[in-house]
Image (cartoon, helix red, strand yellow):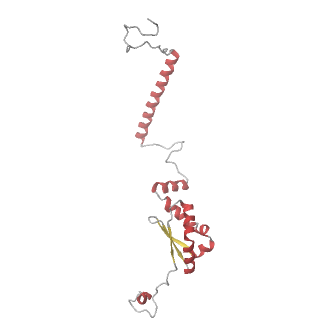
Amino acid sequence: MSAEEPAKDTPLDAPQEKPKTPEPSGVDLARVALRAAKEQARARGDAAQQKKQARRGGLRSGARADGRDPQPLGSAINRLITERGWETPAAVGGVMGRWPQIVGEDLANHCVPQRYDENERVLTVQCDSTAWATNLRLLAPQLVARLNEDLGHGTVRLIKVLGPGGPARRFGPLRAPGSMGPGDTYG
């Protein structure tokens, strides 16, 4: 019989003797015990601290910063905008505030943004004359591209251009009671 073959009287599935790992020495056992004791003490301390805070009526402010400390106004407003989902309306409002820088002083003097419909993604702009309204209609595709570049793709789909409004309907000395003004004649 060779040394490499298993003995015939030993089954193949019998456990073979494995080399033993060395037992931890006294110093290693002490380190393991110390680590375990520290973790248990930390857990007990955390639990005791939470009980104390609950008895006192909640967390107290201390020297360290926490979520209840005063925040700068800008970061508080940004957090509010994010929590409420107002990113797009706030961005469009910013565009309305920067309208002269976006479209140019000349166009901004004659065309004013009125409102933004978030569902339809339509920006409504009113012009003070029909000539400026026609000019803005011609520039609308370029303006939509510029606004989407500034606000994010797809924020503005269409610019609705309004011409000048009609004269104010006023009561006058020759007005018939109950009449609708010029609307009686034309509409």
Residue found at the very far bottom of the displayed protein: 174
* Rendered position, 8 above or below 152: above
Q: Quadrant of the C terminus?
A: bottom left
Residue 57: which quarter of the image? top left
Q: In the image shown, does 57 or 179 lie closer to the viewer?
A: 179
> How many numbered marks does the figure carry?
0
Instruction: Give the residue displayed 55% in from the left and 73% down from the top.
Output: 112
Q: In the image shown, does 43 or 114 lie closer to the viewer?
A: 114
Q: In the image shown, does 49 or 33 lie closer to the viewer?
A: 33
* Rendered position, 174 above or below 129: below
* Rendered position, 66 above or below 123: above
Residue found at the very far right of the displayed protein: 105
Instruction: Give the residue displayed 54% in from the left and 53% down from the top.
Output: 75
Give the image location of residue 104, x and y in percent: 62, 70
Give the image location of residue 76, x and y in percent: 52, 54
Instruction: Give the residue displayed 53% in from the left and 44% down from the top.
Output: 65
Give the image location of residue 116, x and y in percent: 49, 67
